[in-house]
Amino acid sequence: MPSRRLMIRQPKQARARESMARMLDAAETLFADGGEDALTVEAVTTRAATSVGSFYARFGDREGLLRAMHARYLENAAAAMRAAVDAAGRRTTLSSAVKAFVGVMCDAVHTHRDASRFFILHKAGDQQLRSMGIEANRALANAFEAVLARHASQVGASRRAVLVDTAVRLLFAMLIQHVMFAPEEVTGRAIGRKAAIAEISRVIVASLRAPPGSR
């Protein structure tokens, strides 16, 4: 889970919190519709029906808005990880636990796809945002590894560490692919989310059960 330093500093007054939430909602919608160039102070405050003074009081400047958007995005990611772990924890087999975890994370990425794409691209040139993103990546890895540890007896014992690491990378690759491309943009063929979840889960489980000596 992302550390406390990633959390948004919420105003104490309910009215100020509501104003801040509206501006963040507006910023996310503007970005989804028009990309980063659409994130102007005027556009955000107009869409959120709030004042420019409120914007600067909450965020300081446009970069402050981006960091608040990033913090909110990571909070949503942390909530999705918790939900994925909970869903997987209610399953009794490796296959069903993996499918439950992958399903929750894939649905979360779909819900926050625009924000995910923005910050994957934006944080590449911002070392603070990049380090925050890397921390979130490791939190995802730790969460998935914790799920797999509950079914360790079903994972190839001779190479368990590398098999688990590879499973995490397969999951991560699927999520990044879903963020960056529409299904038909990868192979030219569309695939439904449920089918993709089922198939990548099957591949992950098969890789975890790889027999000794297989490569």
Image: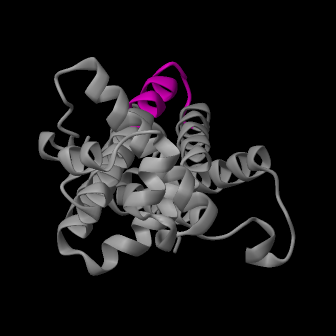
Q: Is residue 17 above or below residue 67?
A: above
Residue 92 magenta: yes
Q: Is residue 26 above or below residue 61?
A: above
**Position of residue 195 measured from the top left corner of the image (x, y, whole percent):** 79, 48
Left of 30 or right of it: where is 80?
left
Left of 34 or right of it: where is 51?
left
Indicate the quadrant containing the N terminus: top left, top right, bottom left or bottom right: top left
Left of 209 or right of it: where is 195?
right
| Chief SS of the magenta region | helix
Start-end of magenta stretch: 81-94
Is any atom of residue 119 visible in this view? yes
Which residue in the rendered view is the most extreme toward the right?
189
Front-lying residue, 186 or 202: 186
Taking the spot 16% from the left edge, 43% from the top edge, the residue there is: 3
**Position of residue 176 measured from the top left corner of the image (x, y, whole percent):** 53, 65
**Position of residue 114 measured from the top left corner of the image (x, y, whole percent):** 56, 58
Is any atom of residue 167 visible in this view? no
Taking the spot 18% from the left edge, 55% from the top edge, the residue there is: 60
Front-lying residue, 83 or 93: 83
Residue 36 magenta: no
Front-lying residue, 174 or 16: 16
Front-lying residue, 81 or 19: 19
Q: Across the whole image, how many numbered discs are drawn on residues?
A: 0
Q: Quadrant of residue 183?
A: bottom right
Taking the spot 19% from the left edge, 74% from the top edge, the residue there is: 127
